[in-house]
Image: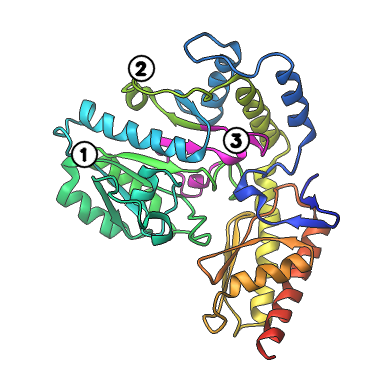
Amino acid sequence: PGSLVSEGKQYFDFLSGYGAVSHGHVHPRILNVAIEQMKECTLSSRAFYSDMFGLYADFVTKFFGYEKVLPMNTGAEAVETAMKLARRWGYESKGIAKDKAVLVCCTGNFHGRTFGAISMSDDPDSFANYGPLLPGIKRVSYGNAEELEALFEAEGKNIAGFIAEPIQGEAGIIIPPTGYFAKVRELCTKHNVCFIADEVQSGVGRSGKMLAIEHDNVRPDVVILAKALGAGFLPVSAVLADAKFMDVFTPGTHGSTFGGNPLACRIAIEALSVMHEEELPQKSATQGAKLLKGLEGIMAKYPETITAVRGRGLFAAMDFTEKIPKGAYAFQKLLKEGGLLAKGTHNQTIRLSPPLVISDTDLTACVKVLDESVAKLIAAQKK
């Protein structure tokens, strides 16, 4: 339960299913409504009316302040849906010539494992030997508003959408410069480009706000949600947008067998209700500040080994010196020995994202494990 998992030995979970278990493992309120719904109805085709989907659609659109929602299952499905939406909107509303629509993404992105998503990636581990990839994709440097502006000025008439993560998770918890997304919003409005925020991992409280994009106080045209929307019980994703974008989808032009099923809807309503009522985004902000302070203390203690720490809410990372090749992966093994589960990315970065319900006592214990594990990593290099 909570921030602990068990395998004969108890472990602190500092990956949280890549953010899916933000509410803690098997949250009792969400478990109870899941059981109740499973006794009634778990799946009804979207070809038919479902009272639970109606309740969910009304709830989630009001909760996030958008006019419409298109329910899907996984984050990658929702990303593909948003890509289709942007292209279709580009042709039908913006007036882009047939097959000329361009989608713009960022360096270092991770939007999933499906073809549209990997076509946007610049990581060979994601796209190598899967070609030919999807055409009509251009990439700009993450956090560089000037580069985006230059591209929009040169090719804006054919650009249907711009998609970005408010905080890049797989890249290593990369936080863009202050004001970056405010400038993105300005540019997308000026050039009539659909602004898509991929909040699959950063959204639903993880960053210390309900949506990570709120740190820049802007409103995207499209928001993609997943992971914590299902609270670790099952895959639930959503694409939120106003009617002027969403209405390009008409009956038969998009769909999903399981998207918006009664069980997913019931769980998502309760997941968001718990997130709000238990003030988990606020807890993420408070506990995240404590975690970052702890990481800064570790970096100060081992400055030649830890080259950087960063975080926003309970979405944090530590970078290891290149002098320790694949240092993050060696470190994650030491963490497991100490009773903490975390995962490295790109060889030198360890991601730290515990459930948002983590207590002060547990957080203090985990910082101690992190500190001791760095010391063990250093000692191992000297052998």
On-image quarter of the C terminus: bottom right
Amino acid at dot 3:
Leu
Say above or below: 144 vs 358: below
* Residue at the spot of label 1: 101
Say above or below: 127 vs 61: below
Identify the residue shown where x is 56% and y is 11%.
Answer: 50
Amino acid at dot 1:
Ala
Q: Secondary structure at mark 3?
A: helix
* Residue at the spot of label 2: 252
> Where in the figure is residue 268, as x and y percent of width and height?
62, 29
| Cα–Cα gap, marks 1 and 3 | 31 Å
* Residue at the spot of label 3: 229
Mark 3 or mark 2: whose residue is earlier in sequence: 3
Q: Secondary structure at mark 1?
A: loop
Could you tell me if the residues under marks 3 and 2 are in contact, i.e. CB atoms within 8 Å? Answer: no
Total marks drawn?
3
Give the quadrant of residue 106. Answer: bottom left
- The reply to whether residue 183 is in sight is no
Q: Nearer the viewer, residue 377 or 105?
A: 377
